[in-house]
Image (cartoon, rainbow, N blue to C red):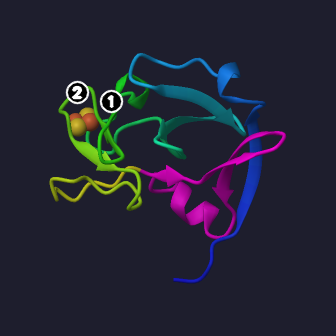
Amino acid sequence: MGSKKYAWHKVAVGAAELQWTPGEIAEVEVDGKKICVARWQDQWFGFAHSCPHAGAPMTDAYVSGGCQVVCPVHHLKFNLKNGGRDVNGEGYTLRTYPVEVREDGIYVGMEEAGKGFFSKWF
Ligand code: FES
Protein backbone atom coordinates (compact mmCIF):
# COMPACT_ATOMS: atom_id res chain seq x y z
CA MET A 1 0.00 0.00 0.00
CA GLY A 2 1.35 3.47 -0.80
CA SER A 3 1.93 6.06 1.84
CA LYS A 4 -1.23 7.84 2.85
CA LYS A 5 -1.56 11.59 2.85
CA TYR A 6 -3.13 13.20 5.87
CA ALA A 7 -4.52 16.59 6.66
CA TRP A 8 -3.66 17.19 10.31
CA HIS A 9 -6.15 18.91 12.60
CA LYS A 10 -5.30 20.26 16.01
CA VAL A 11 -7.93 18.99 18.46
CA ALA A 12 -6.49 20.12 21.79
CA VAL A 13 -3.54 21.89 23.33
CA GLY A 14 -2.93 18.97 25.66
CA ALA A 15 -4.51 15.90 27.27
CA ALA A 16 -5.77 17.92 30.23
CA GLU A 17 -8.00 19.96 27.94
CA LEU A 18 -9.97 16.89 26.84
CA GLN A 19 -12.97 15.42 28.67
CA TRP A 20 -12.02 11.83 29.47
CA THR A 21 -14.67 9.19 30.06
CA PRO A 22 -14.31 6.56 32.79
CA GLY A 23 -13.17 4.25 29.96
CA GLU A 24 -10.29 6.62 29.15
CA ILE A 25 -11.73 7.84 25.86
CA ALA A 26 -12.23 11.44 24.79
CA GLU A 27 -14.43 12.79 22.02
CA VAL A 28 -13.00 15.37 19.64
CA GLU A 29 -14.40 17.03 16.57
CA VAL A 30 -12.62 17.34 13.23
CA ASP A 31 -14.37 19.19 10.41
CA GLY A 32 -17.69 18.65 12.17
CA LYS A 33 -17.05 14.90 12.47
CA LYS A 34 -16.92 13.28 15.91
CA ILE A 35 -13.91 11.09 16.54
CA CYS A 36 -12.73 9.26 19.64
CA VAL A 37 -9.19 9.43 20.92
CA ALA A 38 -7.61 7.21 23.52
CA ARG A 39 -4.25 6.62 25.09
CA TRP A 40 -2.65 3.29 25.73
CA GLN A 41 0.73 3.28 27.40
CA ASP A 42 2.56 6.17 25.70
CA GLN A 43 0.67 6.02 22.45
CA TRP A 44 -2.39 7.86 21.22
CA PHE A 45 -5.00 6.45 18.87
CA GLY A 46 -7.95 7.89 17.06
CA PHE A 47 -10.99 5.86 16.02
CA ALA A 48 -14.55 6.11 14.80
CA HIS A 49 -17.28 7.45 17.04
CA SER A 50 -19.60 4.53 16.14
CA CYS A 51 -18.96 0.81 16.42
CA PRO A 52 -18.87 -0.92 13.00
CA HIS A 53 -20.95 -3.81 14.35
CA ALA A 54 -24.21 -2.09 15.26
CA GLY A 55 -23.35 1.55 15.72
CA ALA A 56 -22.88 1.77 19.48
CA PRO A 57 -21.26 5.00 20.68
CA MET A 58 -17.59 4.28 21.19
CA THR A 59 -17.38 7.06 23.75
CA ASP A 60 -18.97 4.48 26.09
CA ALA A 61 -16.29 1.92 25.25
CA TYR A 62 -13.16 1.39 27.30
CA VAL A 63 -9.53 0.77 26.60
CA SER A 64 -8.21 -2.54 27.83
CA GLY A 65 -4.83 -4.24 27.86
CA GLY A 66 -3.12 -5.09 24.60
CA CYS A 67 -4.14 -1.79 23.07
CA GLN A 68 -7.73 -2.85 22.58
CA VAL A 69 -10.91 -0.86 22.80
CA VAL A 70 -14.00 -2.77 23.93
CA CYS A 71 -17.44 -1.84 22.58
CA PRO A 72 -20.01 -1.18 25.33
CA VAL A 73 -22.86 -3.10 23.68
CA HIS A 74 -21.73 -6.51 22.40
CA HIS A 75 -18.20 -6.25 23.73
CA LEU A 76 -16.32 -6.79 20.50
CA LYS A 77 -12.70 -5.85 21.03
CA PHE A 78 -10.85 -3.86 18.42
CA ASN A 79 -7.10 -3.73 18.25
CA LEU A 80 -6.09 -0.12 17.69
CA LYS A 81 -2.57 -1.07 16.70
CA ASN A 82 -3.49 -3.20 13.72
CA GLY A 83 -5.88 -0.75 12.14
CA GLY A 84 -8.89 -1.48 14.30
CA ARG A 85 -9.62 -5.09 13.35
CA ASP A 86 -11.73 -6.99 15.86
CA VAL A 87 -9.67 -9.48 17.81
CA ASN A 88 -12.31 -12.22 17.58
CA GLY A 89 -11.89 -12.41 13.82
CA GLU A 90 -15.54 -11.62 13.10
CA GLY A 91 -14.57 -9.36 10.26
CA TYR A 92 -15.43 -5.96 11.70
CA THR A 93 -12.96 -3.13 11.44
CA LEU A 94 -13.17 0.01 13.50
CA ARG A 95 -12.04 2.99 11.45
CA THR A 96 -8.86 4.38 12.93
CA TYR A 97 -7.11 7.73 12.62
CA PRO A 98 -3.51 8.60 13.37
CA VAL A 99 -2.88 10.90 16.31
CA GLU A 100 0.27 12.93 16.84
CA VAL A 101 1.32 14.71 19.98
CA ARG A 102 3.31 17.76 18.97
CA GLU A 103 4.87 20.52 20.99
CA ASP A 104 1.87 22.76 20.44
CA GLY A 105 -0.90 20.23 20.78
CA ILE A 106 -2.69 17.03 19.85
CA TYR A 107 -3.36 16.46 16.16
CA VAL A 108 -5.63 13.97 14.37
CA GLY A 109 -4.87 13.01 10.78
CA MET A 110 -7.66 12.71 8.26
CA GLU A 111 -6.78 10.82 5.13
CA GLU A 112 -6.79 13.02 2.05
CA ALA A 113 -6.48 10.56 -0.82
CA GLY A 114 -9.63 8.53 -1.37
CA LYS A 115 -11.54 10.53 1.24
CA GLY A 116 -14.66 10.63 -0.91
CA PHE A 117 -14.58 6.93 -1.61
CA PHE A 118 -14.08 5.88 2.00
CA SER A 119 -16.58 8.31 3.44
CA LYS A 120 -19.18 6.30 1.54
CA TRP A 121 -18.40 3.23 3.64
CA PHE A 122 -17.58 4.58 7.09
S1 FES B 1 -22.45 -2.53 18.60
FE1 FES B 1 -20.35 -2.74 19.10
S2 FES B 1 -20.04 -4.86 19.28
FE2 FES B 1 -22.13 -4.65 18.70
Q: Position of residue 121 (x, y in %)?
A: 44, 56
Distance Cα–Cα, label 1 vs label 2: 6 Å
**Residue found 66% across the figure and 54% down from its top:** 110
Q: Quadrant of residue 7?
A: bottom right
Q: Is residue 67 magenta?
A: no
Q: Are marks 1 and 2 in contact (CB under 8 Å)?
A: yes
Q: Which mark is residue 46?
A: none
- Above/below status of 39 relative to 16: below
Does mark 1 have its CB less than 8 Å from ligand 1? yes
In the drawing, does residue 117 fall left or right of residue 72?
right
**Label 1 amino acid?**
Ala
Residue highlighted by disc 1: 56
Q: Is residue 112 magenta?
A: yes
Q: Position of residue 120 (x, y in %)?
A: 50, 56
Q: Which image quarter has ligand 1?
A: top left
Identify the magenta region.
95-122
**Label 2 amino acid?**
Val
| Secondary structure type for disc 2 | loop
| Secondary structure type for disc 1 | loop
Residue highlighted by disc 2: 73
